[in-house]
Amino acid sequence: MSARDSSAGTPQRARLFTTESGELFDSRRLRLISYNIQVGISATRFRHYVTHSWKHFLPHAASFDNLDRIGELINQFDIVALQEADAGSFRSFFINQVEYLARRGHFPHWYYQTNRNLGRFAQHSMGLLTRILPFKITEHRLPGLIPGRGVMEVHFGQPEEPLVLLLLHLGLAKRARLRQIDYISRIVNDYRHVVVMGDFNCRAHSEEMDTLVAKTDLGRPVDELPTFPSWRPMHNIDHILVTPSLKIREALVIQDAVSDHLPIAVDVLLPESIHT
């Protein structure tokens, strides 16, 4: 079975959206950030999961203030991976939050992948914001008992030697995550220059991460970067991993508690053979 065949469904080629022109970037250096934005809902206490739970179903004006803060933060990066965005439903005032953040952050290209479509009530999605034009984007539906998880495969540079980014949001159950890691590993092994980034829902030293590192050339993520919960970070469940050809110059968690997750960012040096 190839990396693109799975009971989860056939991968789909994606349509890329374009806004106004973005800023120039260093072609050898990439600033990447991954952020679970919790649909623009702020959370600063555990009790907010109860007292703010209605915001997952009903629109609330404060979400725009939160999105504006996120847009200001991500403006300094080249590529952004978003998790838990809404692609336009009742709870988001029918605003596509990925597009909204692309415009607020002045990103020229953006794309969203809806993993769980609940019609007018919710559009559970991941998002890509980028200053670099990719030449290929493929959607993958990840296996799991409960559908609604996915990975976005994004290719930059040249087809003969691409830089491949895998943007993901893994399941809550360990058994599902192990199946999803197996699927992702087969994609990683098809390429030399790979970045895997997103909300893994597992720590750096976990069976799932051990499996991913053992099955691929990906380096182990830094384990001293807790991202959850944002008000008292204790768990490192958001990660950015790279293959050996890519060099991480800096990795950090940004202390900006808008969501229940803190964003994680890396500064990556690309080899000269990659032309973005």
Image: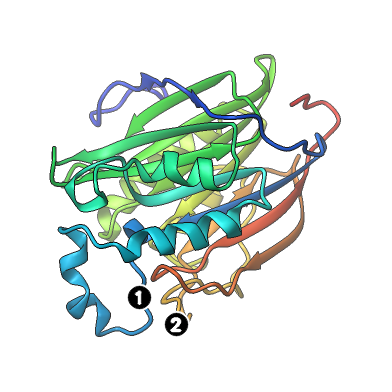
The image's mark for residue 231 is 2
* Residue lying furthest right: 272
Disc 1 is placed on an element classified as: loop
The reply, left or right, for residue 2 in relation to residue 33 is: left
Identity of the amino acid at label 2? Trp
Q: Residue at point 29% right, 60% down?
A: 174
Residue at mark 1? 43
Q: Position of residue 199 (x, y in %)?
A: 43, 56
Residue type at the position of mark 1: Ala
Residue at 32% in and 56% down: 39
Q: Residues within 10 Å of mark 2 (few under 14, many from 20)?
A: some
Judging from the image, what secondary structure is the residue with disc 2 in? loop
Nearer to the camera, 94 or 139: 94
Residue 56 lies, in percent from the top left, at 20, 61
Observer-nearest residue: 82 or 177?
Answer: 82
Asked if disc 2 and disc 1 are in contact, CB closer than 8 Å, the reply is yes
Q: Nearer the viewer, residue 86 or 184?
A: 86
Residue that appears at 15% across and 67% down: 54
- Which sits earlier in the primary sequence, circle 2 or circle 1? 1
